[in-house]
């Protein structure tokens, strides 16, 4: 059964959800299909893209945009605690990507 935690950050209460295998497969398919990444969303935190948070929480993009980096750090810590296997896969994919030579 999927793990779900309730988290309160500031005045917001929301769910943090464990991804299913199907969710992770969809994440990977979406990642491969994205032609132009949002640099801020990709680079603000090392662990994940801001676009990953709605997949793992009940937060909307609009709510995430209104949060501070310190508040988002609390969300990320909770998301990592619930989705350890996803973050292990993400790390493996990043390591594999670093071994691919750049296109000429």
Image (cartoon, rainbow, N blue to C red):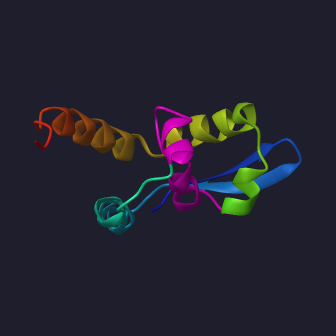
Q: Which residue is more in the foreground, 47 or 20? A: 47
Q: Which residue is more in the foreground, 98 or 59? A: 98
Q: Which residue is drawn at 70% across and 52% down?
A: 64
Any magenta on residue 79? no
The number of callouts visible is 0
Could you say which quadrant of the image residue 9 lies in? top right
- Left of 54 or right of it: where is 19? left
Any magenta on residue 50? yes
- Left of 78 or right of it: where is 34? left
Write down the region rendered in magenta. Answer: 39-60
Residue 25, percent across and down?
30, 64
Q: Which residue is drawn at 15% across and 38% down?
A: 102
Residue 79, percent across and down?
55, 44
Is 8 rendered above or below residue 24?
Answer: above
Is 37 rendered above or below residue 80?
Answer: below
Could you say which quadrant of the image residue 96 lies in? top left
The quarter in which the C terminus is drawn is top left
The answer to whether residue 59 is seen in the rendering is: no
Is 84 rendered above or below residue 57?
Answer: above
Residue 26, percent across and down?
35, 68
Residue 63, percent across and down?
75, 57
């Amino acid at each position: 059964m999927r793990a779900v935690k309730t988290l309160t950050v500031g005045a917001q209460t929301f769910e943090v959800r464990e991804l299913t295998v199907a969710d992770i497969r969809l994440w990977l398919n979406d990642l491969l299909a994205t032609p132009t990444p949002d640099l801020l969303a990709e680079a603000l935190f090392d662990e994940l893209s801001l676009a990953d948070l709605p997949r793992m929480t009940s937060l909307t993009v609009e709510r995430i945009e209104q949060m501070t980096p310190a508040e988002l750090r609390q969300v990320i810590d909770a998301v990592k605690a619930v989705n350890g296997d996803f973050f292990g896969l993400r790390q493996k994919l990043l390591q594999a990507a670093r071994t691919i030579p750049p296109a000429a």
